[in-house]
Image (tube, rainbow, N blue to C red):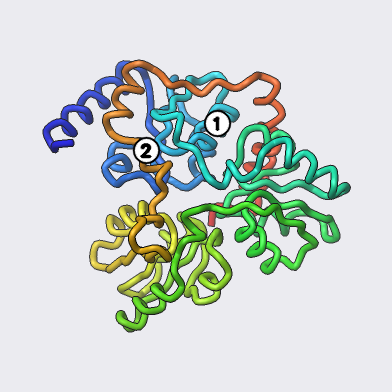
Amino acid sequence: MSEKENSKYISGIKLLKEKKNAIILAHYYQDGKIQDIADFVGDSLALSRKAESNSADIILFAGVKFMAETAKILAPQKKILLPDMDAGCSLADSCKAEDFRKFIEDNPGRTVVSYVNTTAEIKAMSDIICTSSNAVKIVNSLPEGEKIIFAPDRNLGNYVLNETGRDIVVWDGACHVHEEFSLEAILKIKSENPGSKILVHPECELPVRLVADHIGSTSALLEFTVKDNGNCYIIATEPGIIHQMKKMNPHKRFIAAPPKDSTCGCSECNFMKLITIEKIYRCMRDEEPEIVIDGKLINDARKPIKRMLELSKNINGNK
């Protein structure tokens, strides 16, 4: 799309937002141009909080489907729009409701802690939700000796298990982006850039986590780059976050960690990148596609999310 067309759509989006009392919430993994037109940009925890507390009538979610569903669950009275219903999540797709129900039955007496990267149906089966920002603190907040199921990300689950030492059974799911980073390529870049630091999302595989200078959620990695006195960082998470890192640290260098297959562009989330400026304009104009969830499912899924939000306030879970 040409810059002229892009500008036309952006102007149209601004007018439609004012006319309809709408806001745009965008995840850090969105394209930088989309982040720049959003009313709020954040990680899953921050976006959940913003979805719950705003005065808009319409929320357009520049993210993936489970995020828009979470917004609808927390703000059922609002119209929640998602510009492309095909914007799914490989991690959420790895945990089907019927399979997870059986998994819970096969592991009785365990508290179910589910990652926010899940469908509304999985959330409704859970006792509490977590994000990568607060997963360790959420698990540590549970009574000692309490047995836990963690789903669906095996890498985040094993990271939480190692950090907490708790009795955790982990569902065998994964994010296709975070599993694809090449340890060999990361170490090569580090050797070519003396003094550089490796920043890693906990959804990455163990060998990549073991070489990290810092492990954290997208917001935690962003915060680290602001507070740290280094000047070069290798970023092992979806590279959309680098847009914010550069804005906050214009004097520092950021290098996207390469995938194992250098020909595939696998370090980008193809689902996140389905959202475009043009689709946002059309979605805002037509007020569709809209997220619609059954009322009972909303009520059942809201309880564990609200429990997370309340707990995370008390434990400062967004840090």
- Amino acid at circle 2: Leu
Q: In this view, does 259 lie to the left or right of 295?
A: left
For the point 70% across and 21% down, the residue is 296
- Amino acid at circle 1: Glu
Point out the tag, 2 or 1, that comes first from the N-terminus: 1
Q: Where is residue 262 in the image (x, y as percent from the top left)?
A: 35, 63
For the point 31% across and 18% down, the residue is 285
- SS at circle 2: helix
Badge number at residue 274 = 2
For the point 32% across and 29% down, the residue is 280
Q: Callout 1: few (<14), some (14-19), or many (20+) C-alpha neighbours within 10 Å? A: many
Badge number at residue 69 = 1
Q: Which of 222 and 54 is in front in this view?
A: 222
- SS at circle 1: helix
Q: Is residue 97 above or below residue 315?
A: above
The nearer-to-camera label among 2 and 1 is: 2
